[in-house]
Image (tube, rainbow, N blue to C red):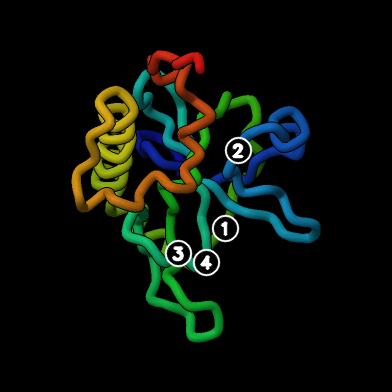
Amino acid sequence: MAGNNKIELRKLKDSFFSDHGDLKEIMKKEENKVRGYGYISCLIEKHHFAIPLRSSITHPYSFVVSTPSEAKGGHQGLDYTKAIIIDPSYLGSTFVIPNNQFGRIYRNQEKIIADFSEYVRIYKEFISTGVLPVEYKNAYSFTTLVNYHEELGLLVKSH
């Protein structure tokens, strides 16, 4: 994807995983498996994010690109709960997915960015106030956003 597109499907370079092995809840690089990420080229909260493509998402905090696989269960799509803040220098080559899935992402770029921005906004409110809307009850149990409090302007509380 190029031009005015805001989401590109890219692989992450191996150096990202070796340089950021301490991140909590991140999708680790598995041997012999390459994961694609939906890289958001516009800034959200002053940062670039990459949202992983996953094949068995069982929660609503995602953008679904295909129906559940009987073998795996869950949907295929972009999983907002495992998004990472990324320096574009860690982006690798283009990640190829079936045309129908690519088309669904391409046609819904604005929705994906708006929904993900809302996911981040509500997380920030939750951390700041302790109040969480009921529809987000389980949204942040295993989120990667715990790694980015400083980047998101959240005060770090000392114990």
Give the secondary structure at mark 1: loop
The amino acid type found where label 2 is placed reads Lys
What percent of the width, then of the height, locates residue 83?
Answer: 48, 41
The residue to which callout 4 is attached is: 55
Q: Nearer the viewer, mark 4 or mark 1?
A: 4
- Say which label, 2 or 1, has the lower sequence index: 2
Q: Which residue is at 29% across, 51% downward? A: 137
- Say which label, 1 or 3, has the lower sequence index: 3
Q: Nearer the viewer, mark 1 or mark 3?
A: 3
79 with respect to 121 (left or right): right
Real-space Cα distance between discs 2 and 1? Answer: 27 Å
The residue to which callout 2 is attached is: 24
Q: Which residue is at 79% across, 60% downward? A: 32
The amino acid type found where label 3 is placed reads Ile
- Say which label, 4 or 1, has the lower sequence index: 4
- Callouts 2 and 1 close, C-beta under 8 Å: no
Image height of 24 relative to 107, above or below: above
Real-space Cα distance between discs 2 and 4? Answer: 20 Å
Q: Nearer the viewer, residue 59 or 11?
A: 59
- Callouts 1 and 3 close, C-beta under 8 Å: no
- Callouts 3 and 4 close, C-beta under 8 Å: yes
Give the secondary structure at mark 4: strand
- Say which label, 2 or 3, has the lower sequence index: 2
The residue to which callout 3 is attached is: 57
The residue to which callout 1 is attached is: 96
The amino acid type found where label 1 is placed reads Val
